[in-house]
Image (cartoon, grey):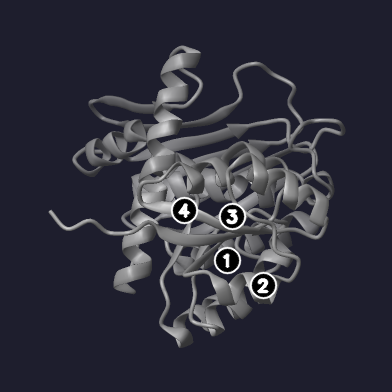
Amino acid sequence: MTNIAPLRVGLVGAGPWAQLFTAPMLAAGPATALAGVWARRHDVAEALAAKHGSIAIDDVDTLIDSCEAIAFAVPPDVQADIATRAARAGRAVLLEKPIGMTIAQAEALADAVGEAGVGSQVVLTNRYLPSMRRFLEDAAGFDAFGGRSTFFGSGAIEGNYFGTPWRLEQGALLDLGPHALDAIDAALGPIVAIHASGDSLTMVAITCEHDGGAVSQVTLSATTAITASGLVVELIGPTGNLVFDTTAGDAEERSREYRTAMATIAAEFATVTRDRGGHPLDVRRGLHLQRWIDAAARQLSR
């Protein structure tokens, strides 16, 4: 068996998600190695890098030049700008959702990745869970005429661990919308029309029409201080229902699932980077979701 060296990935960002998820994932191996960390606050980057046996780099372009690929854990507008530069430099990009703060940023990033011919992958975390992958396999053979996707969280509450400025300002639609829309789109078929109502800082309800005639309801809130927060997807048809629920199971079971998902993300990104191949959750998938989020945002603003 041929031994392949870990993919050397640079990390842009050292905030809450980088500390909790992205840095540990990249540093854990065996598919990837955390080659360096850049953040606007160099002292925070140094602390995170030291924790994982890496180094802090004080210039983002130096980070891009010194690594094989770049991962992101920064606000969407910062990601869109730096990821575009990374792609143009020939680096594969591991992106967070949403891929940009605006549809224009998302389109520009997708164009840059396409023109450069580099690999891309979006960390829609739930899609890498073994239970979600089993659910989607079952959904492919399930006769459904409708469904629902809900995501309740607390990331837009002041003082929450994930209550970063962009989440507090944007609310649920931009933060949780990619997860919920992606899940129902994957399970019921491509969304072809939506109608959105509500307020992104409290609760949003989105009625979706799917290719093939199915209908679904997506409900989002990032200001719910409830214990059972997370993504739930249910398909409904003449024979019953099919459910995926991240709030079910005990804490240890959920932890095992997420550890598996982290390893899967890293392994698939290493393959995508080296093969310059596609991935079902690439930048184009991120753009597809952002177009529906943009459409919903325009309806809410009216």
- As helix, strand or loop, the secondary structure at mark 2 comes to helix
| C-beta proximity under 8 Å, tags 3 and 2 | no
Quadrant in which the C terminus is drawn: bottom right
Q: Residues within 10 Å of mark 2 (few under 14, many from 20)?
A: many
Which amino acid type corresponds to the residue marked 2 in the rendered image?
Ile
Residue at mark 2 to residue at mark 4: CA–CA distance:
20 Å
Q: Earlier in the sequence, mark 3 or mark 2?
A: 2
Residue type pointed to by label 4: Ala
Front of the two marks 4 and 3: 4
Q: Is any atom of residue 236 visible in this view?
A: yes
Q: CA distance from mark 3 to mark 2?
A: 15 Å
Q: Which mark is residue 33?
A: 4
Which numbered circle lies on residue 97?
3
Give the distance between the C-alpha atoms of the residues marked 1 and 2, in whole angstroms: 21 Å
Q: Which element carries disc 1, helix, strand or loop? A: helix
Q: Earlier in the sequence, mark 1 or mark 4?
A: 4
Q: Nearer the viewer, residue 31 or 245?
A: 31
> Image height check: is 168 above or below 212?
above
132 and 201: which is toward the camera: 132
Q: Which mark is residue 291?
A: 1
Vertical arrangement, residue 263 with respect to residue 152, above or below: below
Cβ atoms under marks 1 and 2 closer than 8 Å: no
Question: How dense is the environment of label 4, judged by Cα within 10 Å: few (below 14), some, or many (20 and up)?
Answer: many
Amino acid tagged 1 = Arg
